[in-house]
Image (spheres, grey):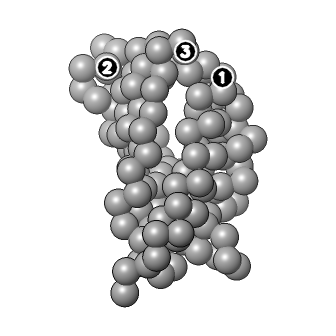
């Protein structure tokens, strides 16, 4: 069953916490989005990152987004208690473009992220 548009808006509002943290270089907002046991997977400059979402928090808190940073949120799917969001990032840290996929669950009436998987665009990999 497709959800009502208000549910898509709620998912987008949740994902905006992720973007705000990245844009401001402050993981505080993202910490209210991700569950404590959330995981991340992706390649950063050719090195596999996997495990606890704490690595994402460290990255956000130590690397500023930069003046050229831009982001776009696409709510890909909302199916009652699960949602998928794609976030396009350009210019993080002044040089990196990412495509993030966030997997959210509706827990106790609130959309929370349980996993983040990402791709670093190949033309932004530091070799």
Q: Secondary structure at mark 1?
A: helix
Instruction: Check disc 2 and report its element: helix, strand or loop.
Output: helix
**Residue position marked by numbered label 1 in the rendering:** 62
Kindly report the distance in space between the C-alpha atoms of the residues bearing marks 3 and 2.
15 Å
Q: Is residue 121 above or below residue 117?
A: above
Q: Is residue 30 left or right of residue 79?
A: right
| Residue occupied by mark 2 | 124
Residue at the (51%, 79%) spot, across then down: 81
In the image, farthest residue toward the left: 123
User: Label 2 crowding class (10 Å Cα cut-off): few <14, some 14-19, many 20+?
Assistant: some
Mark toward the start of the polypeptide (3 vs 2): 3
Q: Position of residue 73 (x, y in %)?
A: 44, 45
Q: Which residue is mark 3?
A: 66
Q: Quadrant of the N terminus?
A: bottom left
N-terminal-most mark, 1 or 2: 1
Distance from the alpha carbon under mark 1 to that under mark 3: 12 Å
Q: Secondary structure at mark 3?
A: loop
Instruction: Point out residue 112 in the picture as x, y percentages from the top left corner.
Output: 61, 64
For the point 61% across and 19% down, which residue is it? 64
């Amino acid at each position: 069953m497709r959800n009502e548009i208000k549910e898509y808006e709620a998912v987008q509002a949740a994902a905006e916490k992720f973007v705000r943290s990245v844009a401001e270089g402050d993981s505080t907002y993202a910490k209210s989005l991700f569950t404590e046991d959330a995981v991340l997977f992706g390649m950063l400059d050719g090195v596999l990152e996997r495990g606890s979402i704490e690595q994402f928090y460290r990255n956000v808190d130590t690397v500023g987004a930069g003046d050229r940073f831009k982001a776009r949120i696409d709510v890909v799917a909302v199916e009652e208690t699960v949602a998928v969001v794609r976030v396009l990032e350009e210019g993080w840290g002044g040089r990196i473009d990412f495509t993030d996929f966030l997997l959210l669950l509706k827990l106790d009436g609130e959309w929370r992220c349980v996993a983040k998987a990402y791709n670093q665009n190949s033309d932004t990999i530091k070799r």
